[in-house]
């Protein structure tokens, strides 16, 4: 493993343009559950059709709103872990770094990453069903209804979280840039995603086709592991600080 970590550190140290693609596993050590893990993934307990589709929201808006409130509360108590901090630190060491995340928790920004593309939106932002975007929790204070109503003049439509649900389009500006960055990078670091949800899962193929080197960090093999030139089997919080240490020549042989 130390040999692989050194190889990854060397690739990263020499990267000209680095894309870091993250999924739910990135935030697991901050106490935020993943989706597809058999024991404790959210989709093992909850039904995505009910909770993460527009049809589900129209059928039972209170159920969906209350579930997202519960997840938001969990996320608001969470802090970035050493893996998030290592991702942010890479920005200080390599000139062109962009983080492309499927996570809606905002923990990369909290850790200090500046260029973050949130493919699936943000659980901290809201929009109404008539298309008023950019609402924050502050805009909704004082409302006791679940879900609240749009506070914009003459609107009153139901408010929902500004996240991407199944069957919905991603923000076109965000996904277009994600594809361009993935085509332009010479190294892609993939952390904590099962690689089954598209279009996010297509990005590593774009990078691979343009001959980028692919490094993956995950305790389990994923749908993307066969693409990886270096597979670092372990958790984000354990592996990423070791990669930084190896970049500093400080990885101690065990
Ligand atoms: P998944 O739950 O599908 O996959 C999580 C991945 O993280 C798995 O491959 C785990 O092995 C890995 N993992 C677990 N613990 C880890 C750790 N400590 N460090 C690193 N990796 C770890 O989550 P995503 O791939 O992010 O979309 O799922 C993609 C999308 O599906 C989500 O954005 C969400 C979901 O439905 C929407 O809600 C639209």
Image (spheres, rainbow, N blue to C red):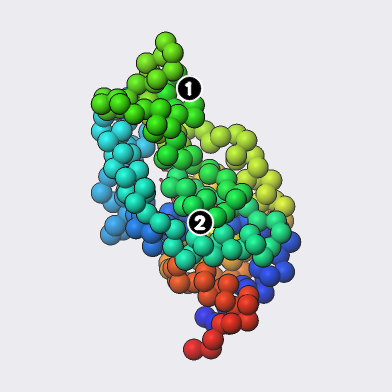
Residue 227 in view in this figure:
no
In the rendered view, tell whether residue 20 sits above or below residue 229: above
Q: Nearer the viewer, residue 68 or 108?
A: 108
At which x and y percent is residue 7?
A: 63, 76
Under tag 1, what secondary structure? Answer: loop
Q: On residue 112, which mark appears?
A: none
Image location (x, y in percent) of residue 149: 35, 21
Judged by depth in the image, the label closer to the viewer, 2 or 1, is 2
Q: Which quadrant of the figure has residue 147? A: top left
Frontmost residue, 117 versus 166: 117
Residue 168 vs residue 102, the one in the foreground = 102
Report which quarter residue 128 is drawn in.
Answer: top left
The residue depicted at 71 percent of the width and 59 percent of the height is 95
Residue neighbourhood size for the residue with mark 1, other residues' Cα within 10 Å, grouped as few (<14), some (14–19), many (≥20): some
Question: What is the quadrant of residue 94 in the picture?
Answer: bottom right
Residue picked out by circle 2: 111
Q: Residues within 10 Å of mark 2 (few under 14, many from 20)?
A: some
- Residue 230 position, x and y percent, is 58, 71
For label 1, the residue is 132
């Amino acid at each position: 493993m130390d040999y692989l970590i050194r190889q990854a550190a060397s690739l990263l140290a020499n990267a000209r343009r680095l894309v870091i693609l993250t999924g739910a596993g990135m935030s697991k050590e901050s106490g935020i559950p993943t989706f597809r893990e058999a024991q404790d993934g959210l989709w093992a307990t909850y039904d995505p059709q009910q909770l993460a589709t527009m049809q589900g929201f129209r059928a039972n808006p209170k159920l969906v709103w209350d579930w997202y409130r519960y997840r938001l509360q969990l996320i608001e108590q969470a802090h970035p872990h050493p893996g998030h901090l290592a991702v942010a630190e890479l920005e200080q060491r390599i000139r062109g770094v962009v983080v492309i995340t499927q996570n809606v928790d905002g923990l990369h920004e909290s850790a200090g990453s500046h260029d973050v593309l949130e493919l699936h939106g943000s659980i901290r932002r809201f929009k109404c069903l008539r298309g008023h975007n950019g609402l924050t929790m502050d805009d909704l204070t004082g409302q006791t209804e679940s879900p609240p109503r749009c506070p914009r003049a003459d609107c009153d439509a139901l408010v929902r979280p500004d996240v991407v649900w199944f069957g919905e389009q991603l923000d076109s500006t965000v996904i277009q840039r994600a594809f361009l960055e993935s085509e332009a990078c010479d190294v892609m670091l993939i952390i904590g995603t099962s690689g089954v949800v598209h279009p996010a899962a297509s990005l590593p193929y774009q990078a691979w086709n343009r001959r980028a080197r692919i490094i993956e960090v995950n305790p389990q093999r994923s749908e993307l592991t066969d693409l990886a030139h270096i597979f670092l089997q372990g958790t984000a919080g354990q592996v990423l600080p070791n990669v930084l240490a190896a970049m500093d020549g400080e990885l101690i042989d065990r």
